[in-house]
Amino acid sequence: MKPLALLRPLTISSAPSNPLFQPQSLPQKHAFRVLCSSFDSKPIQDGYTAAKPDNNKPGILDDLFLNLFRNKMVQEVGWDSEKPGYEGLIEVANRLMMRGRTNSDTKEAAVRILISLFPPFLLELYRILIAPIGGGKIAATMVARVTALSWQWLMGKCTINSVDLPDGTSCRSGVFVERCKYLEESKCIGICINTCKLPTQAFFKDYMGVPLLMEPNFTDYSCQFRFGVLPPLPEDDISLKEPCLEICRNATRRRKVAGDMDVPHCPKA
């Protein structure tokens, strides 16, 4: 045998009768891509569903996130509930709402809680280094995915979807909450607005450099996050003009005092 023959590429002749000799394609590795386009992407099959089927069965990470968030809230409020788990968290959120002299005080306290969840300098580095890339679309897409993955324990089932951006394009930087557990358990529009919607919008814009519009639906308890979209002015935000929920305990008391008269909007919103 000639030595040069060893350098020839090895070829395998087709062998249809033996499936072991059939060439098989190797699995293809998919790199992370930011899907932004001038048209709407397909619904959820192009993204993923970041949720668990049963909110009543929290996992280990859910308990870890809940306890971390609750501890930060307790430090801000200076009070803790005797009730365990999510029920106790809602009571602390109620105390946070009642503690503020104004709605602005409550919003600022909630922003401080969100800031305290992150290591020092991380938020500033993200705002300076990541937020400007690609006109902000990469940062918006990243925080949408992190939100859907890490905040299910608080909100419930979340899915990534496509949202329209101010420049006329669309981007998969949306998070749709099918039925917000925080709103449903708190039973209060004011808690939703002042401890969640307004402070979260302010936190992402001011400390991460990512505009955010949150659109809670007080009829079916869903909520649409639109990262990369600026919220309207307070006087133009319809969420701030919603009437109290029928299940709101405080609203029930007010209606009885007022002779079952309708409350025009939530006084805490």
Image: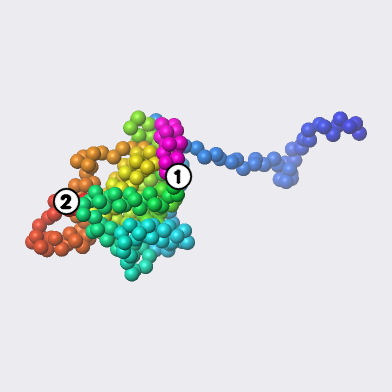
Left or right of 170: which side holds 218?
Answer: left
Using the rendered view, name the quadrant where residue 215 is placed: top left
Question: In screen coordinates, is 198 left or right of 136?
Answer: left
Residue at 42% x, 63% y is 57
Compared with residue 18, is residue 167 higher up or lower down, i.e. above or below? above
Residue 221, image x and y in percent?
A: 29, 53
> Residue 180, located in which quarter of the rendered image?
bottom left
Q: Is residue 83 above or below residue 29?
A: below
Does any portion of residue 225 appear in the rendered image?
A: no
Residue at x-position 19% and y-position 47%: 241
Q: Say what amino acid the circle numbered 1 marks.
A: Leu
* Badge 1 or badge 2: first in the primary sequence: 1
In the image, the segment drawn in magenta is 122-136
- Please give the residue where the numbered disc 2 appears in the rendered image: 265
- Near-viewer residue (12 or 85): 85
Q: Secondary structure at mark 1?
A: helix
**Crowding near pointer 1: few (<14 within 10 Å), some, many (20+)?**
few
Q: Which residue is mark 1?
A: 122
Scheme by which the image is coloured? rainbow
Tag 2 secondary structure: loop
Question: Residue 109: percent from the left, percent from the top?
Answer: 30, 52
Q: Which mark is residue 141?
A: none
The answer to if 133 sits in the magenta stretch is yes
* Corner quadrant of residue 35: top left
Judge by depth and name the residue closer to the eye, 38 or 238.
238
The CA distance from mark 1 to mark 2 is 38 Å
